[in-house]
Image: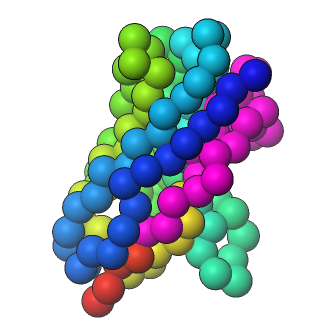
């Protein structure tokens, strides 16, 4: 069982930065691939970024590539999403996820944190 709690959302102007954190409970955190999804009002939930259990590989949606960076600290059971050069279209609720086998079907979801980017 993994419990995920996100923090770090807020309101920022276009071009600004935010850093989202996800704190995970559970002794087996290091065995899970971790990621972030987001959902804007009236839109489908979409993949944002992912990192493998070891941190060796990362993956990004084309829309955030070069602007967002995902990282993890297995000693602290945390995953971080550094978001730079934010755009109004990045406005959404951001969810931390954990997957034992595939991030296409995450096993655990956080409650979400709101990111609002003003133009």
Looking at the image, what colour scheme do you see?
rainbow
Q: Which residues are magenta?
A: 95-115
Q: Say if residue 11 shows up in the picture.
A: yes
Residue 116 in which image quadrant: bottom left
On screen, residue 31 above or below 14: above
User: Where, quadrant-wise, is the C terminus in this rendering?
Assistant: bottom left
Up/down of 25 relative to 13, above or below: above
Is residue 6 magenta-colored? no
Q: Is residue 34 left or right of residue 14?
A: right
Where is residue 77? Give x, y as percent.
Answer: 47, 21
Residue 26 image-quadrant placement? top right
Q: Quadrant of residue 87?
A: bottom left
Q: Is residue 66 left or right of residue 96?
A: left
Expressed as whole percent of the image width and height from the top left, the position of residue 9 reads: 40, 61
Q: Which residue is depicted at the point 59% across and 24% down?
A: 25
Q: Position of residue 32 (x, y in %)?
A: 63, 19
Q: Is residue 67 left or right of residue 23?
A: left
Where does residue 89 sit, x and y in percent of width and height? 44, 78
Q: Is residue 58 visible?
A: no
For image coordinates 63% across by 11% down, the residue present is 28
Residue drawn at x 48%, y 39% as measured from the top left: 22
């Amino acid at each position: 069982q993994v419990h995920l709690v996100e923090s770090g959302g807020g309101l920022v102007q276009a071009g600004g930065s935010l850093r989202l954190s996800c704190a995970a409970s559970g002794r087996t955190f290091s065995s899970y691939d971790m990621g972030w999804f987001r959902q804007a009002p009236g839109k489908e939930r979409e993949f944002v970024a992912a990192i493998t259990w070891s941190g060796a590989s990362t993956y990004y949606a084309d829309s955030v590539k070069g602007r967002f960076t995902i990282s993890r600290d297995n000693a602290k059971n945390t995953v971080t999403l550094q978001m730079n050069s934010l755009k109004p279209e990045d406005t959404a609720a951001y969810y931390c996820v954990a997957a034992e086998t595939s991030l296409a079907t995450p096993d655990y979801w956080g409650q979400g944190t709101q990111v609002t980017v003003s133009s």
